[in-house]
Amino acid sequence: MTDKQLRVSKIENGTVIDHVHGGQALNVLAILGIDGSGGEQVSIGMNVPSDTLATKDVVKVEGRELSQDEVDVLSLIAPDATINIVREYDVVEKHRVDRPETVTGVLSCPNHNCITNADEPVETRFAVLRDGVRCEFCEQIVREDIANHIGGD
Ligand code: CTP
Ligand code: ZN
């Protein structure tokens, strides 16, 4: 990168989610439940050049160290993401996302008759399959566009 190119600034403390497939940055924030109302400083790079992907998105969350459980859910939409924990400007931990066995409270079920869509205090839960997710209440399978189902309650 040359000095003429603008880059997203380094962060002091927090989490950098790197190598997100181009265009998925906003879905990453949605999955993590970050909408700005929590007061975090968030920087986003979209469709920036990458060594390993054609283009990538980068999400930097200042002041918050995301747990492995939180970031594992990202594997559904960002399977190649790298999670970097930053302290005092240094990357002190770097790991990949892992596919979790289940995802709770993140996705909504597309089946209108599902109990999770009735007026009941039931949190959504999906089993993670090799090529999609399956609702643990009604067995509905979602294979494509999982990002369209973010926002489970
Ligand atoms: N980063 C940051 N703030 C810091 C340190 C790092 O925003 N204080 C970002 C970098 O811009 C990069 C990511 O965190 O997007 C990983 O940093 P680093 O490990 O230094 O970069 P690379 O070695 O290029 O990472 P990788 O090998 O994972 O591509
Ligand atoms: Zn369901």
Image: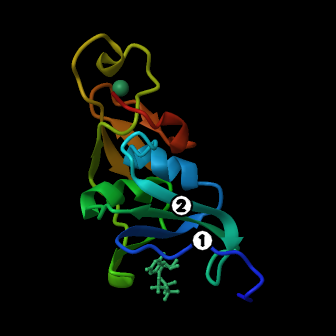
The disc at residue 8 is: 1
The residue sitting at 50% across, 54% down in the picture is: 77
Q: Report whether the residue tagged 1 is closer than 8 Å to ligand 1.
A: yes
Residue at image mark 2: 43
Q: Is residue 9 above or below residue 99?
A: below
Q: Nearer the viewer, residue 92 or 113?
A: 92
Q: Report whether the residue tagged 2 is closer than 8 Å to ligand 1.
A: yes
For label 2, the SS is strand
Check the picture and name the quadrant holding the N terminus: bottom right
How many tags in the picture? 2
Mark 1 → mark 2, Cα distance in angstroms: 7 Å
x and y percentages locating residue 23 in the rendered image: 65, 55
Q: Amino acid at mark 1?
A: Val
* Direction right: furthest residue: 4
Identify the image quadrant of residue 66.
Answer: bottom left
Q: Is residue 67 above or below residue 124?
A: below
x and y percentages locating residue 21 in the rendered image: 59, 63
The residue sitting at 50% across, 60% down in the picture is: 78
Check the picture and name the quadrant holding the C terminus: top left
Q: Is residue 112 left or right of residue 86?
A: right
Tags 1 and 2 touching, CB below 8 Å? yes
x and y percentages locating residue 50 in the rendered image: 65, 78
Q: Earlier in the sequence, mark 1 or mark 2?
A: 1
The residue sitting at 26% across, 58% down in the picture is: 69
* Direction bottom: furthest residue: 2
Query: What is the crowding at mark 1: few (fewer than 14 residues within 10 Å), some, or many (at least 20)?
Result: few
